[in-house]
Image (spheres, grey):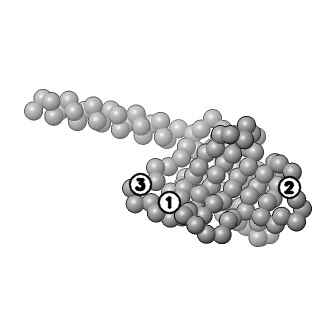
């Protein structure tokens, strides 16, 4: 009986620590971002990309990141656990200025502030804002 109690308490402590760590925002701010890309999962047409990099003027899916900076949560929220049955949706990939480190939100669950950013990206890409 005592082993069961110790195991349950230990599991509770681990779950509390994981929950605490996942609920804290990331130390990433809008000025740290190089590129935001909307990617369908597992497949589908690509969404718009917003970047600080130079891009061809005729590329309608690549837009200037400055157009959506006001919608980027600062600091970025932590990512959400996707669950065991996550099979499809959309992924928002955030590439940082070093062009190596990325943060992914989705495909099934995203923080509310990232959903609002997602909506703004679509609206701006479709010239609705």
Q: Is residue 20 left or right of residue 124?
A: left
Query: Would you name the residue on which mark 2 appears?
Result: 55
SS at mark 1 in the image: loop
Query: Would you name the residue on which mark 3 appears?
Result: 83
SS at mark 2 in the image: loop
Q: Is residue 46 visible?
A: yes
Answer above or below: position of 122 versus 7.
below
Query: Would you name the residue on which mark 1 appears?
Result: 108
In depth, the one of 40 and 71 nearer the eye is 40
In depth, the one of 73 and 103 nearer the eye is 103
Please identify the quadrant where the N terminus is shown: top left
| Residue at x 50% of width, y 64% of height | 88
Q: Is residue 27 left or right of residue 15?
A: right
Please identify the quadrant where the C terminus is shown: bottom right
**CA–CA distance in space, label 1 to label 3:** 8 Å
Q: Position of residue 73 (x, y in %)?
A: 66, 47
| Residue at x 82% of width, y 51% of height | 66
Q: Local crowd at mark 2 within 10 Å, few (<14), some, or many (≥20)?
A: few
SS at mark 3 in the image: loop
Mark with earlier residue (1, 2): 2
Q: Position of residue 3 (x, y in %)?
A: 15, 30
Answer above or below: position of 116 versus 52.
below
Q: Local crowd at mark 3 within 10 Å, few (<14), some, or many (≥20)?
A: few
In depth, the one of 24 and 52 nearer the eye is 52
Q: Circles 1 and 3: CB distance less than 8 Å?
A: yes
Q: Is residue 75 left or right of residue 56?
A: left
Q: Circles 1 and 2: CB distance less than 8 Å?
A: no
Answer above or below: position of 105 versus 39.
above
Q: Nearer the viewer, mark 1 or mark 2?
A: 2
Query: Residue placed farthest to the right in the image?
Result: 57
């Amino acid at each position: 009986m005592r082993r069961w109690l110790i195991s349950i308490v230990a599991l509770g402590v681990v779950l509390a620590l994981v929950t605490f760590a996942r609920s804290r925002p990331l130390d990433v701010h809008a000025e740290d971002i190089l590129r935001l890309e909307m990617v369908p999962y597992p497949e589908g047409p690509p969404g718009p990309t917003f970047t600080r990099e130079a891009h061809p003027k005729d590329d309608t899916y690549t837009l200037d990141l400055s157009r959506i900076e006001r919608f980027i949560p600062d600091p970025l929220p932590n990512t959400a656990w996707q669950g065991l049955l996550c099979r499809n949706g959309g992924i928002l990939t955030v590439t940082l200025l070093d062009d190596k480190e990325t943060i992914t939100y989705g495909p099934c669950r995203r923080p509310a502030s990232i959903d609002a950013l997602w909506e703004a990206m679509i609206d701006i890409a479709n010239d609705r804002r």
